[in-house]
Amino acid sequence: MGNIVAIVGRPNVGKSTLFNRLVGHRKAIVDDFSGVTRDRHYGKTEWIGREFTVIDTGGFVDGSDDVFETAINDQVKIAVNEADAILFMVDVADGITDLDKSVANLLRRSKKPIFLVVNKVDHNDRLLETSEFYGLGFDEMYNISSASGSGTGDLLDAVVAALPPVQNNEEAEEEEESLPKIAIVGRPNVGKSSLVNALLGEERNIVTDVAGTTRDTIHTEYKGFGYHFLLIDTAGIRRKAKVKEDIEFYSVMRSVKAIEDCDVAVLVIDATVGLDSQDLNLVHLAETNGKGLVVLVNKWDLVEKDHKTSNEFEKVIRKKLEPFVDVPVIFTSAISKQRIHKAVEIAMEVYANRTRRIPTHKLNEVMLAHIEAYQPPAIKGKYVKIKFVTQLPGRSPKFAFFCNLPQYVNDSYKRYLENKLRESFDFHGVPVVIYMRKK
């Protein structure tokens, strides 16, 4: 199970800058239609060998300074419920504001590890000004400059130390043999609940809620039509805390958790809206976590068919998914239950693809022939010789190609290798990772 660290605080204290520093400046997502670039608000990071997901809550409040206190406070409550640790950010240049105080009051009641992060401490005079933040009532604070990165190392050391311990290998292996986990994710109101109901409503007696599942995502054991898996449903959950529905942010937190926890994510999108930047965030998260992916276009019955065939629509989706285009796209209507079982069938095929192991002799026989047919381009007169390929252990397909000059193999050649792997061994719907290693 992945861990989630949320960055909270009022607007303009530098949350996004810290987020970008932690997650690495990945290219912002470009929204084809309106020509806007939208930043990502959640992504994976790694520190001293420990991976976790970081969420920048600032991306979910519209407006800037004039944001209502309630919106921020609602978000903080959601973050406290859902995250494993919270970075509470304040700005040394502004001192303590009323909004900081109200956020601090909410956080102090929480049982989760809270880290008070004082930002923009970039010279000694500023250091002297930080002491007033002890007035917020936290034992420790971390002075950083998210722009230059100073102080972030100590902060991350403390965060990683506070995260729940990772399962030991035996438990992880035991879990590996358990049922495939299929998660239904997507934005609010795209029809996730009706999809789940269409699946589970068919034969109610085959549904058993698994005991001991967490209260936050519903794991339902599904047996039927020759399939047996755990369905992770983020749709039908109503929050216990009486927080006004900040649906967007809330559903994102849930979807992130479900993706971390599943083998295959079924991303439900609304045919009348198409694939938007939040959906692409989830795709990216599934990809970086090595999870299988199926895109389910729901409400297809509402689309005017004359000018938009499913083929054209699919082309637009694949264009947005680039470079991870080898993904099944299914058109459905949860209301009419059209192709619902097709979705289950495909998700289980993707699960099989993700767990596929290729024998080393077969891998070399096939891939060395493709490499022979199209050699890596020579760089500065040096020729790259790839001698041997092996699949690395793990839950998703990763391959090591051993060669004399790994640093000279460019991305487009790696894509060639990936495409040949996909053509030869069927990794439809699954991210494939390629490593060049010194032999």
Image (cartoon, rainbow, N blue to C red):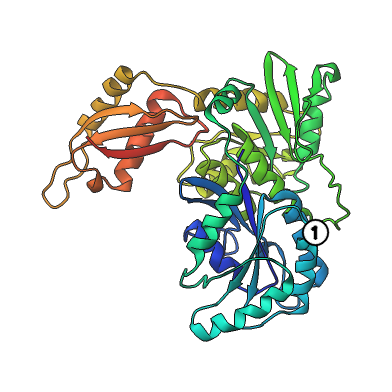
Instruction: Residue 66: name its quadrant.
Output: bottom right
Quadrant for the N terminus in the image: top right
Q: Position of residue 376 (x, y in %)?
A: 22, 41
| 13 and 121: which is toward the camera | 121
**Image vertical order of residue 266 relative to residue 145, above or below:** above
- Toward the right, the furthest residue is 242
The single residue placed furthest to the left in the displayed view is: 381
Q: Amino acid at mark 1?
A: Arg
Task: Say left or right for 286 vs 64.
Answer: left
Furthest residue toward front: 139
- Residue at point 78% right, 54% down? 247
Q: Is residue 31 above or below residue 258?
A: below
Residue in the image at 75% along x and 44% along y: 190
Q: Residue furthest top?
A: 226
Question: In the picture, residue 383 is in which quadrant?
Answer: top left
List the residue tagged with mark 1: 109
The reply, left or right, for residue 353 in relation to residue 331 is left
For the C terminus, which image quadrant? top left
